Image (cartoon, rainbow, N blue to C red):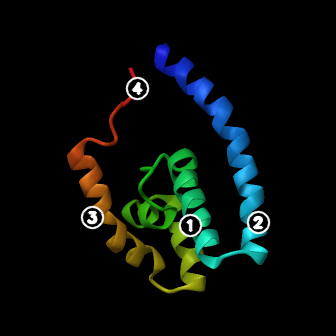
Amino acid sequence: MKERLAGFLLMSAIVPMAIAGYLLLVVVGLAGSTARGRAGVRALDHFVNATLFNGYAWESVSSHAWRAREKRWAKVVIRVTDFFQRGHCQRANKREQPLVDLMLAKGLHKQTIF
């Protein structure tokens, strides 16, 4: 119960900042630094993977899709990304899998509060 309450309080502060960050990302994407925009999009990608696809916070949707390529949602993601860049998900997984393995080996995916 303590963890849920702490999570609720934390999210009450983070969600408004996330919305502001997304709006700033739109502005930066149109007229700002490419590196800053890329970092923001990468963070948003990891957020979407962790929340919508129940993936690891250290992994992109593309890498997770390659890992779970037998699932229907992953097949759709792979098909869409292949339209823009052939083999994108496989390359993303090859690049990110060592980070996921390290995270699991160090136990960084385990509960950290209370």
- Position in image of residue 103 (x %, y %): 29, 50
- Position in image of residue 16 (x %, y %): 73, 40
Can you name the residue that lies furthest to the front here? 33
Between label 1 and label 3, give the one nearer the viewer: 1
- Position in image of residue 74 (x %, y %): 50, 63
Q: Are marks 3 and 4 in contact (CB under 8 Å)?
A: no
Viewer-side residue, 49 vs 112: 112
Between label 3 and label 2, give the one nearer the viewer: 2
Residue drawn where x is 51% and y is 67% of the image: 75
- Ranked by sequence position, the earlier of labels 2 and 4 is 2
Against 17, residue 11 (above or below) is above
Residue drawn where x is 62% and y is 32% of the image: 11
Separation (CA) of disc 1 from disc 4: 27 Å
Residue drawn where x is 63% and y is 78% of the image: 34
Q: Are marks 3 and 2 in contact (CB under 8 Å)?
A: no
Q: From the viewer's perspective, is 99 left or right of 11?
A: left
* Residue at the disc numbered 3: 98
* Residue at the disc numbered 4: 113
* Residue at the disc numbered 2: 26
Separation (CA) of disc 1 from disc 3: 20 Å
Separation (CA) of disc 3 from disc 2: 31 Å
What is the secondary structure assignment of the residue under circle 2?
Answer: helix
Q: From the viewer's perspective, is 101 left or right of 69?
A: left
User: Disc 4 marks which amino acid?
Assistant: Ile
- Ranked by sequence position, the earlier of labels 3 and 2 is 2
What is the secondary structure assignment of the residue under circle 1?
Answer: helix
* Residue at the disc numbered 1: 39
Count neighbours of disc 3 (C-alpha within 10 A) and say few if under 14, some if 14 to 19, many if 20 or more.
few
